[in-house]
Amino acid sequence: QVQLVESGGGLVEAGGSLGLSCAASGSFSSINTMGWYRQAPGKQRDLVATITPDGRTNYGDSVKGRFTISRDNAKNTVYLQMSSLTPEDTAVYYCNCDAVSLFWSRNYWGQGTQVTVSS
């Protein structure tokens, strides 16, 4: 089992910045791709950004140039630095990872953290 614990959400004014972090813990051999997704009320869950263990990143079109994803492999932690936030960034942000052990490979979701951007 893998637990993902997110932190850093909250309320911020438009144009501001906010950082999220997510730490993976549990019984696994390694963590492959880690990422962030978000879901606004009444909308589907969308990609924000992903990062591989060797640092390759992928961003959703709406956040390119404003958000930066990074990770600390030694700590099994992924970070999301968000800047130039707009009210359209308001959503629940979910951490995601692919965890691997000797006998299985599974995808996990965090519980989500609310980010609210006021206009």
Image (cartoon, rainbow, N blue to C red):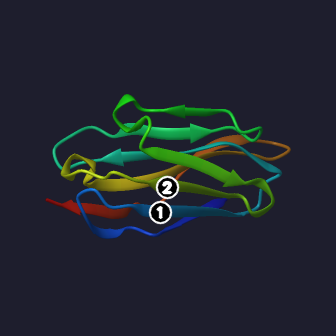
Image quadrant in which you'd find residue 48: top left
Does residue 19 appear to the left or right of 92 in the view shown? right
**Contact between labelled residues 2 and 1, with CB atoms less than 8 Å apart:** yes
Q: Which residue is mark 1?
A: 19
Q: Amino acid type of disc 1?
A: Gly
Q: Quadrant of the rendered structure where residue 78 is?
A: bottom right
The quarter of the image holding the N terminus is bottom right
Kind of residue indicated by mark 2: Gln
Q: For mark 2, what is the residue?
A: 81
Q: CA distance from mark 1 to mark 2?
A: 4 Å
- Circle 2 packing at 10 Å, graded few (<14), some (14-19), many (20+), is some
Would residue 74 be found to the left or right of residue 7 on screen?
right
Residue 107: x %, y % from top left: 59, 43
Q: Identify the secondary structure beneath mark 2.
A: strand
Q: Where residue 88 sits: x, y (%)? A: 21, 46
Instruction: Judge the density around disc 1: few (<14), some (14-19), many (≥20) Cα neighbours within 10 Å.
Output: some
Give the mark nearest the N terminus, 1 or 2: 1
Q: Is residue 78 above or below residue 88?
A: below
Q: Residue 34: which disc? A: none
- Residue 60 in the image: state x and y as whole percent: 42, 32
Which of these two is toward me, 38 or 98?
38
From the viewer's side, name the closer residue of 27 and 10: 10
The C terminus, quarter of image: bottom left
Please tell me whether mark 1 sits on a helix, a strand or a loop: strand
Residue drawn where x is 47% and y is 63% of the image: 19
Vertical relation: 13 (above or below) 104: below
